[in-house]
């Protein structure tokens, strides 16, 4: 299961610095001026999962294949983006292609002084910033539906689209639209405001553990709208990512058990309800991503279509049992290795051996 996330926000809120920290690269420019990112930067990053190395040690495998998430750094949106301001139409089309949205929100001061960072609105107001971006996304969705209405030939489908447009124009985002239709599904319209959102509160280093008043505002806004938040110091994360010698020292200084990037990647990964199952052997230990609720036969198809077509059974051991009883043979002896049929619902952490014809 492929997953890609788009990083969005106003200019100069820390998007490209976050992208660089995620990818440990300098692919994205992060100069202190708007629109320094002219085309989206794309990279694949590992979904951190400590279970992989534990499994690899247990089965004596030197080859670990983690799951990857694609990250797209999309240039800063501004007011009027839906009408083309700041190359808005181009950037909005890039957002439409991602599965989930990481919305970076500036939650630190620093407007004036030698270390000042320009803010496109010349003041710090995270809720205003969120509403500017989300209003432009909403307008872009409305424009998309208007175009589809113009092309629609089926009367029922046209009526379905018109009802969606009416709700969008009243300020209701696509994910919150209530519409009764047995024939058409809003999920298939690729609307930006239908995608799940994770807000990243970008704070200064001294606020990473407790947040600040700006974070409180964002967290309350997110809670009211059914979204998630995470607090990061993007500058600190960039320092950690790019300083191999002193990474642990920096994390210890700020009481961090692991880089905040790991928390961000895992949070982004879970936005779509994805879970992970494993295959483990001396040749390789590998993580596979599937939607929650996937059957054993469909999970087999993620590995290879023949596994699904010729599915016989799946030998399933939970991760905890696999470790506790030292692998497949130990789990088998105590009855913890279960042979499941094609309709078995795979659980997060299952270690599976598929048997097929």
Image: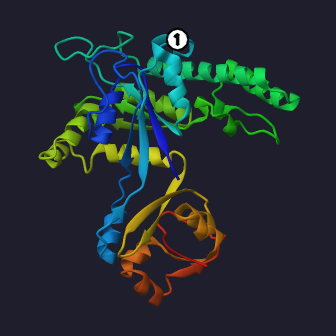
Mark yes or no: residue 170 visible: no
Q: Position of residue 145 (x, y in %)?
A: 70, 24
111 vs 357, left or right, is left
Give the residue displayed 52% in from the left and 11% down from the top: 80
* Residue 22 point in image, percent of width and height: 32, 40
Q: What is the quadrant of residue 285 in the picture?
A: bottom left
Q: Which residue is mark 1?
A: 80
Tell me where residue 331 sits by quadrant: bottom left
Task: Determine if residue 25 is in view.
Answer: yes
- Quadrant into which the C terminus falls: bottom right
Left/right of residue 141 with respect to residue 325 in the rendered view: right
Graded by Cα atoms within 10 Å as few (under 14), some (14 to 19) or many (20 or more), the crowding at tag 1 reads some
Q: Image point 17% across, 46% down: which residue?
A: 247
Q: Residue furthest bottom?
A: 333
Rendered position, 191 above or below 347: above
Instruction: State the residue in front, 262 or 141.
Output: 141
Question: Which residue is at 57% across, 57% downward?
Answer: 292
Identify the image quadrant of residue 167: top right
- SS category of the residue bearing label 1: loop
Q: Position of residue 356 (x, y in %)?
A: 59, 77
Q: Work out whether 97 lies above or below 307.
A: above
Against 15, is 62 above or below? below
């Amino acid at each position: 299961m492929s997953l890609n996330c788009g990083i969005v926000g106003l200019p100069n809120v820390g998007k490209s610095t976050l992208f660089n920290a995620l990818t440990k690269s300098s692919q994205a420019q992060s100069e202190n001026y708007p629109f320094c990112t002219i085309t989206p930067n794309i990279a694949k990053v590992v979904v951190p999962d400590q279970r992989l190395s534990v499994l690899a040690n247990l089965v004596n495998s030197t080859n670990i294949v983690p799951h990857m998430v694609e990250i797209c750094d999309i240039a800063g949106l501004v007011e009027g983006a839906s009408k083309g301001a700041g190359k808005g139409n181009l950037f909005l089309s890039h957002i439409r292609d991602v599965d989930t949205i990481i919305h970076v929100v500036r939650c630190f001061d620093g407007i004036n002084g030698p270390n000042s960072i320009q803010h496109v609105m010349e003041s710090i107001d995270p809720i205003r910033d969120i509403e500017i971006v989300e209003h432009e996304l909403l307008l872009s969705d409305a424009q998309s539906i208007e175009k589809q209405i113009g092309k629609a030939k089926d009367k029922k489908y046209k009526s379905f689209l018109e009802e969606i447009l009416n709700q969008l124009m009243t300020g209701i985002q696509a994910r919150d639209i209530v519409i009764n239709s047995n024939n058409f599904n809003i999920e298939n319209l690729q609307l930006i405001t239908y995608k799940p959102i994770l807000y990243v509160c970008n704070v200064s280093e001294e606020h990473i553990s407790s947040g600040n008043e700006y974070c409180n505002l964002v967290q309350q806004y997110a809670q009211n709208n059914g979204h998630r938040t995470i607090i990061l110091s993007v500058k600190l994360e960039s320092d950690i990512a790019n300083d191999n010698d002193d990474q642990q020292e920096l994390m210890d200084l700020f009481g961090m058990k692991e880089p905040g990037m790991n928390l961000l990647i895992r949070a982004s990964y879970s936005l779509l309800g994805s879970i992970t199952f494993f295959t483990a052997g001396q040749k390789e230990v590998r993580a596979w991503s599937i939607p929650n609720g996937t059957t054993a036969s469909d999970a087999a198809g993620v590995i290879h279509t023949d596994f699904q077509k010729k599915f016989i059974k799946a030998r399933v051991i939970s991760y905890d049992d696999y470790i506790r009883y030292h692998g497949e043979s130990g789990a088998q002896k105590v009855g913890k290795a279960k042979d499941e049929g094609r309709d078995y619902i795979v659980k997060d952490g299952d270690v599976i051996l598929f048997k097929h014809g």
